[in-house]
Image: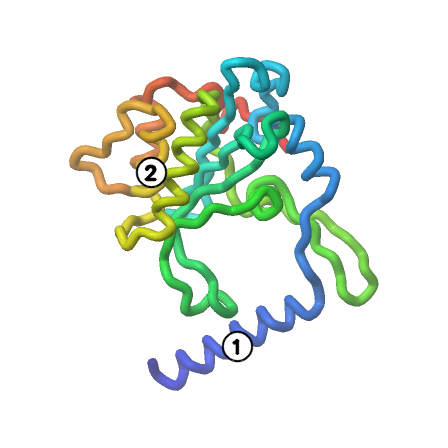
Amino acid sequence: MNFTSILSAFAVILSISSSSAWSVYEHDQNDLQLSKQTSLMSRHPYASLNQEPKKGVMTLCFKEQEKASLVFEVFLPATPNEISLRMIHYGQEDDCCGFGGEKKVMIDSSIDTLKKVYRAVEVSNINNSRSYIPATYTRYASWIISNDRLIQGLVQAEQDQSSNDSYNSIKYVSKIMKIAGLNNVDFGLWKKKANNLKLLVDSHIQPRPDYTNVNLPAY
């Protein structure tokens, strides 16, 4: 790394540190409570999900060019009558200021998922003012899926967190999509890239999405 690169990296660190000093990012408590009784991703009625056999919602999301995630709205055994949010993705974990983290399978909590996929609240450390920050991930398609299948996908992701297997973001979400019960999630000779995954979703994957980026409800 040359001297110019070192200076540039140092400037980024100072910028991030300054931003953190001026404000913090939180979730909205009302959003968290709403997420337990409503499918925020698709607005699918809670009553139709919370009946035997229980169903959940899996939503494919994208951030920037090649970062994909799956958001699960799932009934967990510990809270069987509340929808829990989990975001599964593969990428680099921040160790310090966005640098140095290892690539791994990550499962985000309800709170972190809300901040990334729904909205966050920026709270000023100066005057305690609050403003909403739009989601950093964009929803692309949602499927209504057996709750048991979503649990299987979540269990697999938990196991993969201790695995040394190497993926990229697109390859990993496609693996979990198969475990959750989707078919034709096969790239063949195509590269495992975001645009190719979108093509699979648009034309090949079965069952077809219950909601797409065209008819997903606006936040």
- Quadrant (top left, top right, bottom left, bottom right) of the N terminus: bottom left
Please identify the residue farthest to the left as the structure is shown: 189
SS at circle 1: helix
Q: Earlier in the sequence, mark 1 or mark 2?
A: 1
Seen at 58% across and 69% down, the residue is 16
Left or right placement of residue 14 versus residue 103 in this view:
right
The percent position of residue 36, horizontal first and vertical second, equals 65, 31
Label 2 Cα crowd, 10 Å radius (few <14 / some 14-19 / many 20+) = few
Q: Quadrant of residue 117?
A: top right
Seen at 68% across and 70% down, the residue is 21
Left or right placement of residue 181 versus residue 42 in this view:
left
The percent position of residue 156, horizontal first and vertical second, equals 36, 39
Q: Quadrant of residue 188?
A: top left
Above or below 64: residue 17: below
The percent position of residue 189, horizontal first and vertical second, equals 16, 36
The percent position of residue 94, horizontal first and vertical second, equals 47, 63
Label 1 Cα crowd, 10 Å radius (few <14 / some 14-19 / many 20+) = few
The residue under label 2 is 195
Please identify the residue farthest to the front as the structure is shown: 78
Q: Quadrant of residue 44?
A: top right
Above or below 182: residue 3: below
SS at circle 2: helix
Q: CA distance from mark 1 to mark 2?
A: 33 Å
Three-letter residue code for mark 1: Ala
Seen at 61% across and 24% down, the residue is 43
Please identify the residue farthest to the right as the structure is shown: 127
Q: Which mark is residue 11?
A: 1
- Quadrant (top left, top right, bottom left, bottom right) of the C terminus: top right
Three-letter residue code for mark 2: Asn
Seen at 27% across and 52% down, the residue is 166
Toward the viewer: 102 or 67? 102
